[in-house]
Image (cartoon, grey):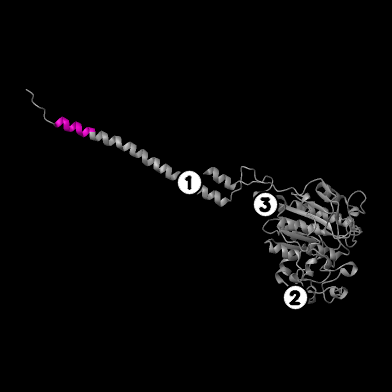
Amino acid sequence: MLFILALATTGPLTGLPAQTAGANNTLFNYLVVIILENRSINQTYGLQCTGNCTYITQLANQYSLAEGYSAVIHDSLPNYLALTSGWTQRLQGTPGDCSPLPSSTKYCPNVNPQIATFPFTAPNIADRIESAGKTWKAYMEDFPTTCAYPSQANCSSGNCYIGYGGPSNEYDSQHDPFVYYADITNNTNRCTQKIVPANSGGHGLPDDNLLNDLGSATTASNLMWLTPNLCDDGHDKCLPYDNATSQQNQFLSQLVPQVLSSNLFTTQRAALFITYDEGQTAYPSDYVTSIWAGPIAKTHYKSSIQYSHYSFLKTIEANWGLQPFNQTTDGQASSMSEFFIPPPTPPPNQPGLPVTTILLAAIVIAAATVTIVAYRLKTNARHRTVPQALLLSRANKTIVFANRPLKNNG
């Protein structure tokens, strides 16, 4: 019985807790995504990069680098939409970098007459994640704590902040794709609970709100998206570096080690994906530095296989069993599963019976054991009492015989 109970509480994994093994052999249970800006792979990786890229290069060499990963279009916002909905929502070029704020001169419908409805009503990654019973949260650096910053005019109907700038004037809504979908901006719970400030200080690192949530599997979401501010993501040149690549390198060198050493990444099947919205050339050769890191990413691994932002989506869809958004984009893309260490499978002699089944078996065996022991004790007791009765009977006969008068034969 003790042996069976031990089986019920012994996990099949080594290195990571048993409960973190993905159901149905999923590659990861948690995913952190960081999106940077406007640099090709040769500008941010290797000896010829345009600035200081020592940490980016070290991280890529230590873990997994997708050398053939391409952005899908220009400019920024259409790529963010492709990453979260499987297509660009008909946006492209300079007009495609438009605002969700109706009062803005760059309001999307005003500068993109091809848009039929806005905010976009197409399904998005938040819908897919929730439909699978998973959770998500989008962390925005320098994001205000209330949509009414500095006035109610910046609030959507669901109280999403759809303004520009935030407390530091370095938050860019065009790098926050979630505020472009109607079923998010019209939903108060999603606006107030799912799109949140990454940093409590309101101006760059530390991204303490994100890091705090990485402290436990109960506070972390399955998908955690991080958009840095305009300095940290390299969109703008900012002092003291005044170099986009160096700013990105500095940002990642301060944040990523804390992510990888967090409780979530040291105890769970968690993955970190870092990529860029776009590079300097054209799809399908707009190659950008794209890194998979964490305890389940392969180390010292590179691949030149062709991937794109749609492959990122395909990886999530394949991992959690989600439906593709578009049969011609993410539907046809390849999953990036080659960059992961597959989850371990139980040995053949451990079929992995449910704990409840094992416990019920233990109870049945225990009950049977008690019954057998009781039966044996009762049987032994009978064997002990029968000889005593016989002895008594024999003793009585002896007494009778002794008291019987003797016959006179003479």
Q: Residue at x 81, y 55 (%)?
A: 274
* Main SS class of the magenta portion in the image: helix
Question: Real-space Cα distance between discs 1 and 3?
Answer: 31 Å
Q: Nearer the viewer, residue 144 or 219?
A: 219
Q: Quadrant of residue 106?
A: bottom right
The residue that label 1 is drawn on is 366
Q: Secondary structure at mark 3?
A: helix
Question: Real-space Cα distance between discs 3 and 2?
Answer: 38 Å
The amino acid pointed to by label 2 is: Ser
Question: Real-space Cα distance between discs 2 and 1?
Answer: 62 Å
x, y percent for residue 213? 71, 59
**Image disc number at residue 20:** 3
The amino acid pointed to by label 1 is: Ala
x, y percent for residue 43? 91, 54
x, y percent for residue 235? 88, 62
Q: Residue at x 30, y 34 (%)?
A: 387
Look at the image and tell me in which quarter the C terminus lies: top left
Sooner in the amino-acid sequence: mark 1 or mark 3: 3
Label pair 2/1, CB-CB below 8 angstroms? no
In the displayed structure, 294 sits above or below 104; it is above
Q: Quadrant of residue 86?
A: bottom right
Residue 118: say if magenta.
no
| Total marks placed | 3
**Image disc number at residue 229:** none
The residue that label 2 is drawn on is 157
Position of 379 with respect to 409 (left or right) is: right
Q: Nearer the viewer, residue 15 or 65?
A: 65
Q: Secondary structure at mark 2?
A: loop
Within-10-Å neighbours for mark 3: few <14, some 14–19, many 20+: some
Sooner in the amino-acid sequence: mark 2 or mark 1: 2
The magenta region covers 394-403
x, y percent for residue 54? 87, 50
